[in-house]
Amino acid sequence: MPFCDLPDLRVHYLDDGPKDGPAVVFANSLGTSTAMWDHMVPHLPDGLRLIRYDKRGHGLTDVPPPPYAMGALVRDAEALIDHLGLTRVVFVGLSIGGLIAQGLAAKRPDLVKALVLSNTGAKIGTREIWEDRIQTTRKLGMAQVAPQILKRWFNHKMPDPLVMQDCVDHLTTMTTDGYTGCAAAIQGTDFITPTSGLQVPALGIAGGRDVATPADMVREVCDLIHGSTFKVIPNAGHIPPLDHPERYAAILTEFLADVAHLPK
């Protein structure tokens, strides 16, 4: 089980596929782990180097005292990619992972060949919404707020029962510090200006039934990046790799064929 030891953080990651293959780095959503991608990855083409990691406060990565700054989350991703000796990766970020993707592309354009911004925005929610969520989570604990989180993720229909149970297990066992720390990072982030300056191939993926980051929000962040493309999975919620893994993989594969020169 690989870990990357940074000066202030031990980061858990997975590194699958040929080491000389096109590198794709995945950053998952608030309240999930690398397992968020598990049902989608088998539908991707062979030959890719797939790197999934747990951001600070999540999964098997260390949980520093909150709050966290978005700059720290971007720095963690940057340090992991540097640790692996990679450049020009395709960075796939979902929700808060999409914010990390934008911040990394703005800070280190040499590291990012292309972006996939999934179920995200340049700014997500308001300071008041996030402050309320942080305080409620601290007061009630993860087990009590988990049902509301799951309702935001899967408001239209619940995924496969085993997938759902994995989500419940992860939410109810993760620390309040990890969840609220990253929530604070979202609360303090507005990437409208830096993202509007990006010059990188970009794909936006939205869920047609996503209430957390509606399709229009994803479209708006795509509109900031010249030449970007935008796709909607009509019946998907906030985490399409879990409720529509095959369709998500198909959209991602088509984009990778263009930017990483893979066969379609």
Image (cartoon, rainbow, N blue to C red):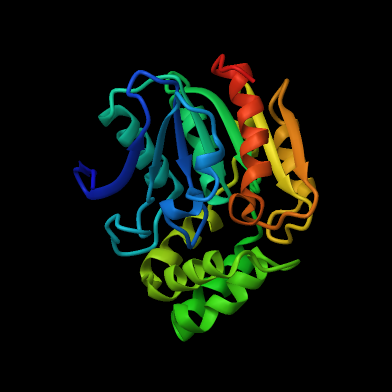
Residue closest to the eye, 149 or 190: 149
Q: Residue at x 28, y 29 (%)?
A: 84
Q: Does residue 200 appear in this view?
A: no
| Quarter of the figure with residue 85 | top left
| Quarter of the figure with residue 131 | bottom right
Q: Residue furthest top?
A: 261
Above or below, 129 against 73 in this view is below
Residue closest to the eye, 10 or 25: 25
| Quarter of the figure with residue 40 | top right
Q: Residue at x 66, y 56 (%)?
A: 238
Q: Residue at x 60, y 34 (%)?
A: 116
Q: Residue at x 42, y 51 (%)?
A: 34
Residue closest to the eye, 101 or 41: 41
From the viewer's perspective, tell me whether residue 167 is left or right of residue 65. right
Question: Percent x, y for residue 165?
Answer: 51, 72
- Tally the marks: 0
Question: Percent x, y for residue 189?
Answer: 55, 49
From the viewer's perspective, tell me whether residue 217 is left or right of residue 62. right
Question: Percent x, y for residue 152?
Answer: 66, 67
